[in-house]
Image (spheres, rainbow, N blue to C red):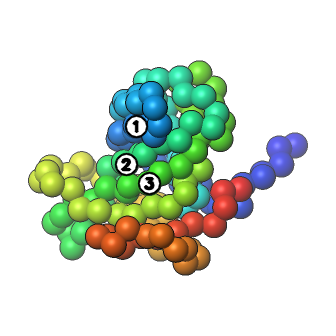
Amino acid sequence: MLIERREKARYPLELVVHYQTLGAQSVSGVGRTVNVSSSGALIAAEHDLEEGARLRVTIEWPTLLDGITPLQLVTTGKVVRHKGFDFCIAFDWYQFRTMKRGASPLLSRTMIKAAAAFSATPALAQSGAPKTAARIPLRNAG
């Protein structure tokens, strides 16, 4: 019998991800999400990243702002698990930003519902937010 240790619901969203390590040796790449929660994501990537690596991650979001403007989820966090080229990141914080390009992916009803549920997840306030965009702070990953 499997015991679920995660506190947050995971949504099976397959979305395009761009990531970059934060620190002295910069590694950047592209991947896709396997699943996403309000506190982290499982990402299939093109690099084998070690546990503890700090990352900046941008996820192309499947819904449009006002039905017109593409969105992206921008976050930083730490790799908490990895297996080969898949890694789990625990988010420090995240924010939705508008994207500069006009193309939008075709969306399934399941992806739209999962993205809407994820976007509506309540979070705690946290200091140190960037002044240029609204930020949604998170509880500790679990």
| Dot 1 or dot 2, earlier in sequence | 1
- The reply to whether the C-beta atoms of the residues labelled 2 and 3 are less than 8 Å apart is yes
In the picture, the disc for residue 55 is: none
On the rendered structure, is 82 left or right of 107?
Answer: right
Name which residue type carries label 3.
Answer: Thr
Crowding at mark 3 (Cα within 10 Å: few <14, some 14-19, many 20+): many
Look at discs 1 and 2 and give the one toward the viewer: 1
Q: CA distance from mark 1 to mark 2?
A: 12 Å
Name, please, the residue furthest toward the left: 102
Residue at the spot x=57%, y=66% of the render? 138
| Dot 3 or dot 1, earlier in sequence | 1
Q: Is residue 51 above or below residue 108?
A: above
Q: Is residue 49 above or below residue 38?
A: above
Name which residue type carries label 2.
Answer: Ile
Residue 66: image location, x then y, percent: 21, 73
Name which residue type carries label 1.
Answer: Gln
Q: CA distance from mark 2 to mark 3?
A: 8 Å
Residue 101 appears in the picture as rendered: yes
Quarter-wise, where is residue 75 in the image?
A: bottom left
Q: Give the labeled residue for mark 2.
A: 59
Q: Give the labeled residue for mark 3.
A: 75
On the rendered structure, is 113 left or right of 50?
Answer: left
Residue at the spot x=71%, y=56% of the render? 142
On the rendered structure, is 92 left or right of 27?
Answer: right
Q: Quadrant of the N terminus?
A: top right
Q: Give the labeled residue for mark 1.
A: 20
Residue 114: image location, x then y, percent: 47, 60
Residue 122: image location, x then y, percent: 55, 76
